[in-house]
Structure formats: C-alpha cells, structure tokens
Image (cartoon, rainbow, N blue to C red):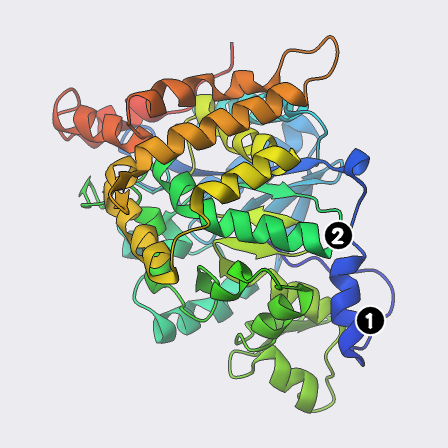
Amino acid sequence: MSQYVAEPGAPVVLERYDQLVEYFEAACKPRASWRIGTEYEKVAVWAATGEAVPFTGGIEELLRRLANRYGWQPVMQKDRLVALQRGGVPITLEPGGQVELSGAPHESLHDSQREFAEHVREIVTVGTEMGIAFLGLGMQPASRIEEIEWVPKRRYAIMRPHMQRVGTLGHRMMKQTATVQPNLDYASERDAMTKMRVGMGIAPLLTAMFANSPISDGRLNGFLSYRGHIWTDTDPARCGLLPFVFRDSCTFSDYIEYALDVPMYFIVRGEHWIDMTAFTFRRFWSEGLGPERATMTDWNVHLTTLFPEVRLKQYVELRSVDSQAPELMLAVPAMAKGIFYEEDCLAAAWDLVKRWSWEERLGLYHAVHRHALRARVRRIEVADLARELLDMATAGLDRQRSDGQESESVYLERLHELVRRGRCPAEGLVEKWERDWNREVKRLVEGTAYRLPS
C-alpha cells in the first residue's frame, strides 16, 4: 500500500482538467529509459508460535534494529517508528505489520535480485535474533484479525471505519494479506493503456500461477488465493477489474474519469490528516472543503488509494499476485518484464485473452481464487493458458538479454517446473499442511520461513 510523502515546495492548486492528463503524460519515457521496480511484502510471525508479530514490542523494534545496524533512516509518526529510508528506497509497514520493501527501479532483474537478497539477509538476521520469522505466504496463516495489532499510522485510522462501511473483508485485506507488485514504465498514452488492458486481461492467469494463500486463521480457508478473493469484497468502488480499459479507444481521460468518482480517504495539511471519505475527488475539486482546495498532491495521493487489479500512476502497477517464497519472488517481475517490455510478447499475451466477454472475464476472475490453474474459461483450463503466457515471458526476457549477462529468464525456471505440472504454490502448501505438517502451525512456519541467502 503506497505511503503518503509530503512534496517539497508550495502546493500546486488543481485548476484545469488538463493538469490531470499532464500528470500521466509527464511520466512517458523512451524505451531506453524503461526500468522495473518491485514491491515485496512479507508477513512476520513469532517463530515459536506462528502468531502475528505485533507492532508494539515487535515490528517497531525490528525497524529500530535495522536502522541502527544497516544505516536505514527512521521515519516517525507521533513518536512511533513506522518506516525506514535508505538511498531513496523505503521499508514501510502494512496495517497489520507486514513488512514491505519498495525496491528501486532497475534496468536489470539481476540488480533487483541482489537488492532483494540484501533485504532478506538484513531482515532475517535481525528477525532471527528477535525470534521473528518471515513467511513466503500471501496471508498471515494463524492469527485472526482481532488478534493482530493495528500499525498506528494516521491513514489507517481513517481507512479502518470506511472499510467496514463498504465491504466485509477490508480489515482482512489490511491486516492479513501480502503481495508482490511489479511497476512498469510506459512510452505514451497508447502504450500505457495497452499495458493496462493486457494487465487486466491476464490478471486471472497471474493470480492462478502464483496462488499462495490457502491457509488463514489456523486452517484451510477453501481458496488457493484467499488474498485474491478478499479483494472482491473490500471496496467495490476502488477494486477489481475495470471494464473501460478493454475498449481500444481507452485513454488517460477514461482512467481520470474513473478516479474522479471514487470516494477519497484523506488529505494532509501540515500535521493534520483530514477525513475525506464523504467526498469523491470530483466533489472535492468542485466544492472544496472550507478553505481547502484540491491540489496536485491531493490527486497523487488519491491515485495511491485506488486498488484495481492494475493501477495507473506515473507507472503501471500489476496487483494480482500473492506474496511468494523467496525463490519465486523474482519470477513475478520477470513475468512482467518479459511480457510487457517486448512488443511482440505484449501483443501475443493480448491475443491469448482478447476474445473473452466481460462476463467471462469476471467469471474467471472469481474462479481462479478457488481453483487457480484448474479453473476454466470456454472449456480451456487456465494451466494451458499459463504455459503459453510463461513461454512468451521467457522468450521476451531472452530477447532482452544483454551481452555477457545471463538471461533474466533464469528467474522463471522454478515457475516453469510448477506450471508444467499444472500446479500453483498453494497446492503444495495444502498437501504439506494435511500430511507432512499434520495441520500444525509450527511446522508450517518451519517449512515456509525465509532463510539467509547462501
């Protein structure tokens, strides 16, 4: 979940619709300047019990030790340590204490891998000293939502009651789930909207391939990607698939029109966080709130509070994947780079899914949460589509290979092994939970905990 960062200088008042369009246009980059950034979320538990690590006396102390040992700069809110910064890269916290590294934009996934390995080394070293384990799962596996402490960030105090008004699973989303999200550059409006369309089109396939959240509240939950299902009843105004992106004529303005009519969460004025959940952005822009007028900073913040399966900011963000075991984490940006940064592969991925009706897309979107690669669309098993998509990504990465470097398709090898057998990570978890681990949380923790990189 993106964090609020105050922008330097005087706020730019929003006066013209063109400013909203220019916000996206300003991010267009030539192909040679494209990079890929990845956000990695991890759930943290006490290694001895499998219970979620609380913020107080747990995650906050973890951040403090990371800062003291590895040169991270503390970020405070009301005297509480809630984030870290180092070299422009943040470590932030989700509402239930999930730890997120927002990786730097890299040209090469080999650089992303080194960055992620360093992060794992740091958090596992400090976590082990504290009795904390980080799990390669898309869900907090044992603790119920009422047993998980809220991270005391001001945005969450506004989001919490709103989530209860608009859906039934919002608090689960906030406190229990974890994801890994690749962020992609775009060259033009047309390129951005093509990537949005393809991303939405293949979202169910990505969910199925990486489904990894079958256990929550200490038992099987009936889903292979329960994290994915949770988003279907979190906040319908800001989540899910967006029908307008499937129109060939879709533009920045279509996304702007959507965003303008989504209820806001907050605006920030100095040290004051103002609840804006009664306002859409369109209404706030039109009417203001007392002396307050909409600014471009408010618009930027508002865009970070929209949660569709593919989100447009000044990059395109893919949001359909459960967090993974470390050995599969880099497979997620590898899939994205192989498909979205090679024009032929992007077109081929769209060919794979373009014939489906809106009803078929919605049906598959829901089906993969339970059945993953065994879900079907038009009597075709998703596993067959996933194999084709994975081959496209592999070809795309091989074409992008730099002289003297190993192909980045190496990060897809483990995924190939799974998809070739028509399996997702969750199915292996379910089998071990029922057999090898005898439904014991302690064994689940031992079997899924991050370890120091070799």
Give above or below for 384 relative to 196: above
Q: Residue at x 51, y 39 (%)?
A: 349
**Can I make out residue 255 in this image?**
yes
Q: Residue 376: horizontal and vertical position, in percent?
A: 26, 43
Q: Residue 66: horizontal and vertical position, in percent?
A: 60, 32
Residue at the limit of the structure toward the right, as seen here: 9
Q: Quick one: label 2, few (<14), some, or many (20+) residues within 10 Å?
A: some
Marks 1 and 2 close (CB-CB < 8 Å): no
Give the side of residue 445 with respect to residue 338, left or right: left
Image label count = 2
Say which residue label 2 marks.
Answer: 188
The kind of residue on which mark 1 rests is Pro
Give above or below for 22 relative to 174: below
Q: Residue 15: horizontal and vertical position, in percent?
A: 80, 81
Q: Residue 158: horizontal and vertical position, in percent?
A: 50, 70
Name the one closer to the observer, 415 or 342: 342
What is the secondary structure assignment of the residue under circle 2?
Answer: loop
Q: Quadrant of residue 111?
A: top right
Say which residue label 1 marks.
Answer: 11
Q: Marks 1 and 2, how far apart in space?
A: 26 Å
Q: Residue at x 36, y 17 (%)?
A: 417
Name the one closer to the observer, 296 or 210: 210
Q: Residue at x 37, y 63 (%)?
A: 234
**Can I make out residue 127 in this image?**
no
Q: Quadrant of residue 134?
A: top left
Q: Quadrant of residue 409?
A: top right
The kind of residue on which mark 2 rests is Ser
Specify which label sits upstream in the sequence, 1 or 2.
Answer: 1
Name the one closer to the observer, 419 or 235: 419
Task: Indicate which label's residue lies in the foreground, 1 or 2.
Answer: 2
Q: Quick one: label 1, few (<14), some, or many (20+) residues within 10 Å?
A: few
Q: Which mark is residue 259?
A: none
